[in-house]
Amino acid sequence: MKDKEIIYGSFFVFYYKKQIDPQYAFVAPKNVARKATDRNKLRRKGYNAIRLLNVPSGAGLFFYKKSGVNATSQDIKTDISFLLKKANFIK
């Protein structure tokens, strides 16, 4: 991710770059959720949300912010959609 760009959302910091194949990852740091089970739950919410959006291309890392801990799945999906539209990956 040397040639990355950054966008800030409500629940995420999104590092991305243009690429043909879609590759996305979600990171929940320890300062956001102390327990590993809570971090895994946050990552699963992110992966489920991006799976429903059917993103055709691009690569990116979604880093959770502390505000994302109490977010609902619908809020997370909305924020991911906003970030992907801002990066021009979806319309």
Image: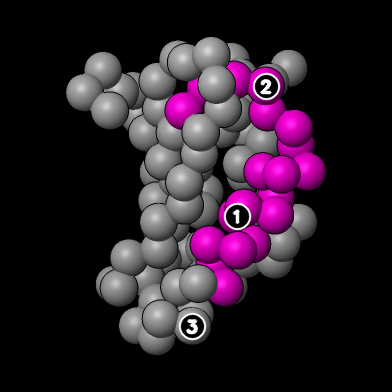
Disc 1/disc 2 C-alpha distance (Å) = 17 Å
**Who's the residue at 46% across and 28% down the image?**
59
**Secondary element at image label 3:** helix
User: Picture coordinates of residue 21 (x, y %)?
Assistant: 55, 21
Quadrant including the N terminus: top left
Residue 46's tag is 1
Measured Cα–Cα span from mark 3 to mark 2:
30 Å
Query: Which type of secondary structure does the marked residue at label 1 adopt?
Result: helix
Which mark sits nearer the N-terminus, 3 or 2?
Answer: 3
Q: x, y percentage for residue 57?
A: 59, 20
Question: Horizontally, is 9 left or right of 55 in the view?
Answer: left
* Three-letter code, disc 2: Pro
User: Which label sits in the foreground, 1 or 2?
Assistant: 2
* Circle 1 residues within 10 Å: few <14, some 14–19, many ≥20: many
Instruction: Give the residue at mark 2.
Output: 56
Residue 40 versus residue 65 in the image, above or below: below
How many dots with numbers? Answer: 3
Amino acid under label 1? Gly
Q: Which residues are magenta?
A: 41-59
